[in-house]
Image (spheres, grey):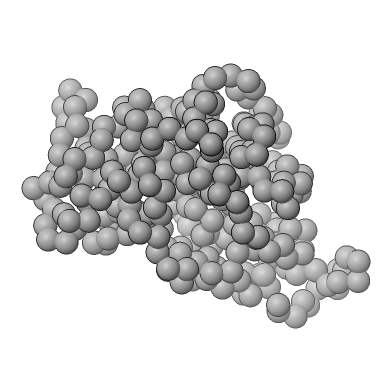
Amino acid sequence: MPAATANATRRGRRLLSAEEFLDWLKPGVHADLIQGETVMHSPVNLRHADLLNFVDFLLRAYIEFHKLGRLYREVVAVRLGPRQVFLPDLAFFTNEQVARLPATHAPFAPTLVVEALSLRTAHLDSGPKFAAYEQQGVTEYWILDPEHLAHQFFRRDGELLVPFAEEEPVIRSQTVKGFWLKRAWLNPKKLPAVRGCLAELGIGPVDEGADLVGRRAKGGKLKAQGSKLKGSTRGQVRHTTAGLASGAEPIALGGARSVWGAPPSSSAWGKGRGSLGSVRGP
């Protein structure tokens, strides 16, 4: 831990500033700075991981297909105040926001934040982190509950984040244009196939040699782009559909083109003040 230079203390401990925390944070370190104190992320159970993987893949494919912005998975530090820096489970930035992002961290709030509850940190996601997201301008906030399925969805109403879609079978995002998902999909013990869910969202399956999720041709049909893929990239794309269903992490291949494949190493998938390491769309 870096030496804190601020005079503020809590329970005899010096509080860190956001800048000190960002200087200390390195790739592979999973932690938040909450009210000046470092809170390390702990390993999660498989229900938590499976649910987050599912929502990640669904949102990411939709956002990339429609070119709405970028979705980051616990890799980008978001500075929300002089003593607040979070690494959200999922953070969506619109294209306008992406254009303003520096190379090291996000100095402003994402448009959409998704946090999945774990036993150790549930009180933080619904307490001080909720308050910080609310105060700093997050437009939409999802709190997913993999244990009890008591999922909560909040949207901005003036200065407050207020509940919406309570007990409704379909949740329609207020910030990701046109995106929706069924509440029944959010049971980590009965997760549907991502491929089928994407089809319901109007994104067709990936055929061999096609782009990540295809591209829309005239008339709304999907047109394969296989003729533009060569060599190893074509071979990697064959595994895209399987990756969507298996829970593999997204990786970047061939520069800007992204496909799903084996999970990257922790050094490549870390977080901190290095490159944002985004997975870009096709």
Residue 134 located left or right of residue 92: right
User: Which residue appears at 55% of the width and 49% of the height?
Assistant: 46
Q: Residue furthest front?
A: 189
Query: From this viewpoint, is residue 269 visible?
Result: yes
Count of labels in the image = 0
Task: Find residue 51 and report its horizontal and vertical position in percent.
Answer: 52, 42
Instruction: Kindly indicate the quadrant of the structure image that contains residue 210.
Output: top left
Residue 87 located left or right of residue 253: right
Q: Residue furthest top?
A: 168
User: Which residue appears at 54% of the width and 56% of the height?
Assistant: 74
Q: Is residue 28 above or below residue 196?
A: below
Q: Quadrant of the N terminus?
A: bottom right
Instruction: Kindly indicate the quadrant of the structure image that contains residue 39.
Output: bottom right
In this view of the protein, which residue sits in the foreground, 64 or 186?
A: 186
Q: Residue furthest left?
A: 227
Residue 89 located left or right of residue 266: right
Task: Find residue 195 and report its horizontal and vertical position in percent.
Answer: 33, 35
User: Which residue appears at 62% of the width and 74% of the height?
Assistant: 23
In this view of the protein, which residue sits in the foreground, 200 or 1?
A: 200
User: Which residue appears at 57% of the width and 60% of the height?
Assistant: 77
Task: Find residue 279 and report its horizontal and vertical position in percent.
Answer: 37, 55
Task: Find residue 55 and report its horizontal and vertical position in percent.
Answer: 48, 40
Query: From this viewpoint, is residue 82 visible?
Result: no
Q: Residue furthest bottom?
A: 3
Q: Is residue 27 above or below residue 79?
A: below
